[in-house]
Image (cartoon, rainbow, N blue to C red):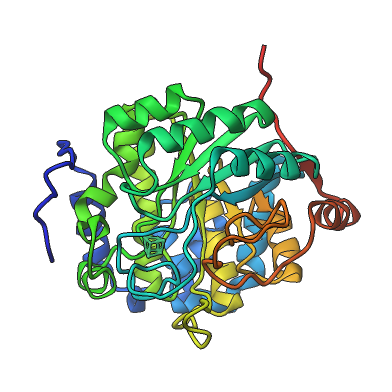
């Protein structure tokens, strides 16, 4: 594992990585028995041990009871609300070499970066769909998408949207603070895998190869006053039970340390990319994915949970009834596609191409309440 930080990387004192890995590395999921699952389902408060029982192999046969408990927790904290957003990719330049990603610097794909005019056209096109929350994404290239470029994009987005998230390369505390002051509400950083060996094998080059800088991104963002932080492991890249546990612990320990922060979790599974159409998630079928989502909901009941268009429509609609609270809609993972002027290749293939209106109607029809925004700006 390359541990040496690049010279532009801030080092913060943090005990979070050690806390996560101490527990994860000492957890053996095969030790859990049916009685542990039954015990976890009976309790009002879910401990770390209960969470492990719920994601263990033996818990699969209790999926209906686990889903019922997750649904009741979901309704207790979120009612029928389902929060809508869409991602906006403004650049796909990337300096990292993540083996599983179509955007990686070794892949010969069509690269693009939107001008501010083009960004505004995208924003206007998305706004017309009725959405009020947007997630701005870049590939991870500080050179091609520098902080000022991102800050200006946020400024434009603020003209049209009430809630603005970022999924960009991890940055330092003062830079998170600058982007927050520019109008960003939350950031999402996926650790992809928390296993250091698997991480090293999949992140061959660039800033992302520094595991510890990435794992501390959310803490730097919270120190930089960002309102919310998002987490996720790329399910199917490594041992999904260990990665699920690590993700949950990452949130759990940071929640205790920064109780004012808003926390969110995503559950991305590996998807085929433009350069590798045969890629599949190891061991994580829809049953395991649902099990993971339900366990997160029970262990972290008031954390937002996003289900992305990596999953098919029917699965997503069921998932928001049971565990997820946030759904992307009208999605394009290409550059400049919302205004119908395709500039760059897509990051991954999507499985739910429905428009905002179609998803809105589908969720209304199953008794859920689509919410475009719940923040009031005065
Ligand atoms: S996963 Fe992110 S950092 Fe890695 S190659 Fe893809 S865009 Fe770049």
Q: Is residue 119 visible?
A: yes
Where's the C terminus, which quadrant? top right
| Residue at 51% across, 70% down | 269
Q: Using the image, determine if residue 243 lies above or below residue 145.
A: below
Q: Which of these two is toward me, 296 or 271?
A: 271
Residue 289 found in image quarter: bottom right
Ligand 1 image position (quadrant): bottom left
The answer to whether 321 appears left or right of 152 in the picture is right
The answer to whether 332 appears left or right of 297 in the picture is right
Q: Position of residue 178 (x, y in %)?
A: 37, 25
| Residue at 44% across, 31% down | 261
Q: Which of these two is toward me, 182 or 120?
A: 120
- The outermost residue toward the left is 4
Q: Using the image, determine if residue 345 lies above or below residue 213.
A: below
- The outermost residue toward the bottom is 278
Where's the N terminus, which quadrant? bottom left
Q: Is residue 82 visible?
A: no
Q: Which of these two is toward me, 195 or 350?
A: 350
Q: Using the image, determine if residue 278 lies above or below residue 153.
A: below
| Residue at 39% across, 75% down | 107
Q: Position of residue 189 (x, y in %)?
A: 40, 50
Q: Using the image, determine if residue 68 lies above or below residue 271.
A: above
Residue 323 found in image quarter: bottom right
The number of numbered discs placed on residues in the rendered structure image is 0
The answer to whether 129 appears left or right of 60 in the picture is right
Q: Position of residue 129 (x, y in %)?
A: 80, 45
- The outermost residue toward the top is 378
């Amino acid at each position: 594992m390359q541990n040496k930080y690049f010279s532009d990387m801030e080092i913060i004192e943090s005990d979070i990585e050690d806390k996560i890995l101490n527990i994860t590395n000492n957890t053996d999921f095969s030790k859990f028995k049916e009685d542990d699952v039954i015990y976890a389902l009976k309790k009002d408060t879910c401990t770390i041990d209960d969470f492990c029982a719920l994601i263990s192999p033996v818990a699969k046969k209790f999926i209906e009871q686990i889903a019922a408990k997750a649904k009741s927790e979901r309704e207790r904290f979120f009612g029928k609300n389902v929060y809508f957003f869409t991602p906006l990719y403004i650049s796909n330049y990337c300096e990292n070499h993540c083996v599983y990603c179509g955007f990686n610097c070794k892949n010969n794909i069509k690269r693009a970066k939107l001008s501010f005019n083009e960004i505004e056209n995208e924003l206007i096109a998305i706004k017309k769909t009725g959405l009020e929350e947007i997630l701005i994404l870049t590939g991870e290239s500080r050179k091609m998408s520098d902080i000022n470029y991102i800050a200006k994009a946020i400024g434009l987005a603020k003209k049209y949207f009430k809630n603005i998230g970022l999924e960009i390369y991890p940055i330092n505390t003062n830079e998170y603070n600058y982007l927050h002051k520019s109008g960003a509400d939350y950031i999402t950083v996926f650790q992809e895998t928390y296993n250091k060996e698997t991480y090293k094998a999949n992140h061959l080059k660039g800033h992302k190869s520094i595991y510890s800088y990435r794992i501390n991104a959310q803490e730097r963002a919270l120190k930089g006053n960002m309102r919310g932080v998002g987490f996720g492991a790329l399910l199917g890249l490594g041992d999904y039970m260990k990665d699920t546990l690590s993700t949950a612990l990452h949130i759990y320990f940071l929640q205790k340390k920064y109780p004012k922060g808003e926390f969110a979790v995503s559950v991305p599974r590996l998807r085929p990319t433009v350069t590798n159409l045969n890629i599949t998630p190891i061991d994580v079928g829809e049953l395991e994915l649902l099990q993971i989502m339900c366990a997160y909901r029970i262990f972290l009941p008031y954390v937002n949970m996003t289900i992305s268009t990596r999953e098919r429509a029917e699965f997503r609609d069921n998932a928001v009834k049971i565990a997820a609270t946030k759904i992307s809609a009208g999605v394009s993972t290409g550059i400049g596609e919302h205004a119908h002027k395709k500039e760059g290749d897509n990051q991954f293939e999507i499985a739910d191409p429905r428009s905002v209106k179609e998803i809105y109607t589908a969720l209304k029809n199953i008794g859920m309440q689509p919410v475009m925004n719940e923040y009031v700006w005065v």
